[in-house]
Amino acid sequence: MGIETSLYWIQEMLQAVVILVGPAMIAALIVGLAVAIFQAATSIQEMTLSYIPKMAAVVLVLFFGFGFMLQFMIDFTVRIFEIIPQIIG
């Protein structure tokens, strides 16, 4: 296995991580920003107020995106297993 092959699969793995984690992180970012703006507008300085909405947003994104995420992971795993014989032999 050459360096080019290793770098290609590392790049593919990092892209897969970004694709799978990105929607949940973006949802948490948007909800956190909305809660921060609400706290600033109402002068509520409770630090734990943003945790529940963030968790709810992440759970909703994961719930609705689970089918896509599972299929993406299965396809990626199949691609890895298909390339193993070419790398070894």
Image (cartoon, rainbow, N blue to C red):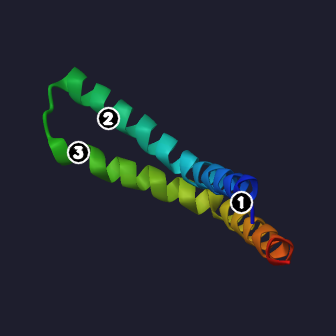
- The residue sitting at 47% across, 53% down in the picture is 58
Q: Nearer the viewer, mark 2 or mark 1?
A: 1
For badge 2, the amino acid type reads Val
The answer to whether 31 is drawn above or below residue 69 in the figure is: above
Helix, strand or loop at mark 3: helix
Q: CA distance from mark 2 to mark 3?
A: 8 Å
Left or right, 47 with respect to 19, comes to left
Q: Which of the two labelled residues, at mark 2 and mark 3, occupies the earlier sequence position?
A: 2
- Distance from the alpha carbon under mark 3 to that under mark 1: 31 Å
> SS class of the residue under badge 2?
helix
Q: Quadrant of the N terminus?
A: bottom right
Q: Amino acid at mark 3?
A: Leu
- Asked which secondary structure carries label 1, the reply is helix
Q: Position of residue 4 (x, y in %)?
A: 74, 52
- Looking at the picture, does residue 6 appear above or below residue 27? below
Residue wearing tag 1: 68
Q: Which residue shows up at 65% across the image and 49% down it?
A: 15
The image position of residue 9, as x and y in percent, is: 70, 58
Which of the labelled discs sits on residue 35, or is there none? 2
